Amino acid sequence: MEIVAASRPRPAASLTLSATASAFDFPLPPELIAQVPTERRDAARLLALDRRSGALTHTMVRGLPDLLRAGDLLVVNDTRVIPARLFGRVASGGAVELLLIRRVDRAEGAAGETWLCLGKPGKRLRPGTALTLTGEVHATVTATTEDGRYAVTFESAADVRAVLEHHGEIPLPPYIRRPDGPLPLDQERYQTIFAANAGAIAAPTAGLHFTTALLQAVHARGVGLARLTLHVGPGTFLPVRVADIRQHVMDPEWCEIPAETAAAIDATKRARGRVVAVGTTTTRALESAAAESGRVEAGTRWADCFIVPGHRFRAIDALFTNFHLPGSTLLMLVSAFGGREYVLRAYAEAIECRYRFYSYGDAMLLQ
């Protein structure tokens, strides 16, 4: 089976208070967790943070072009969310649920595809367990990992991507409550307009705010657009379970930076423009590919950069992002870029002003 080494953070030696997970906690009223998107993607609110002064500006996402400069470059993640959740039963009739993460090397002696999965309940997913999934597709649990994942091998005739397209469910995060499954609007709105390369199990949510009209306004401002692909995996959203974040291990995620994107970034920096990352996933891809000089290397790789305060940003100059979970690796990344105190102060103001949080919520621009 394919094994990908997990990353460790690379903080500066001065990392002290912000090394504790509790330093990134904050109280969030549950009613501020957005359950549905705004009617228009660019109708969400936008809180802009000046990283030098801590000053905050309240506007709307459709006002983003006014905050950008001619010569800037927006870099977006064009991954597409796959309907990665499958339901089924074991031979005794007990229900199981799988979340397919990615295809891996075939299990020894297996004729069909093997996928790395999350699943529940764990007591029904022991190695050797036969599964019958939606659509009468048959599979077998062939291995378990120390971190609670499963290798599941499908019958030889099964085209797993086709199975997912016909029978899979879009894997909305658990804080978006859908007791009866995703709504019709989720099929469209939980994909960005950039979505082209299938492989993610969660959306790069900062990109959910963009519309064709907004891109046209950005272009009219003299701002360029470049794309990369990072397939969002469980490493993006799994919680930090250790008190000292320096001990947290984060899954790498597969990414590809096209040569034209690397060239556009290089040209932007030489012209003294700014590289504006749309989302934390874009940020991780770029920072993982950035040399000490700041030059971003094109190609495919596993993005293995766990970004915490103390990280020296080499690739990006501004960040457009959503509001994130307390204590999450995403909030740690944003705090590394904007300053923990400034970011938590901005979050406190967002809560006071009733901004909407998480995937379907409002946005921030840090510059």
Image: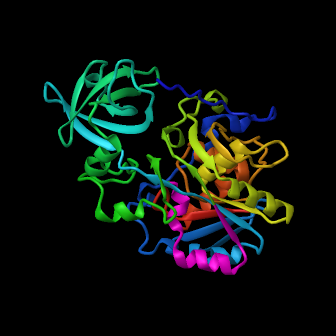
Residue 270 x, y percent position in the rendering: 86, 61
Residue 260 x, y percent position in the rendering: 69, 58
Residue 55 x, y percent position in the rendering: 74, 66
Judge whether 58 appears above or below 112 on screen.
below
The magenta stretch spans residue 51: no
Q: Residue at x 66, y 57 (%)?
A: 345
Colour scheme in the image? rainbow
The magenta stretch spans residue 215: yes
Magenta region, main secondary structure? helix
Asked if one can make out residue 355 in the rendered structure from this viewpoint, the answer is no
Q: Is residue 111 rendered to the left or right of residue 217? A: left
| Residues drawn in magenta | 204-226
Q: Quadrant of residue 156?
A: top left
Q: What is the quadrant of the C terminus in the image? A: bottom right
**Which residue is at the front of the view, 271 or 7?**
271
Q: Residue at x 38, y 64 (%)?
A: 188
Asked if one can make out residue 175 in the rendered structure from this viewpoint, the answer is yes
Judge whether 12 appears above or below 34 on screen.
above
Q: Residue at x 58, y 33 (%)?
A: 250
Q: Residue at x 71, y 46 (%)?
A: 287
**Which residue is at the front of the view, 244 or 218?**
218
Judge whether 216 appears above or below 333 on screen.
below
Residue 255 x, y percent position in the rendering: 59, 45
Total marks drawn? Answer: 0
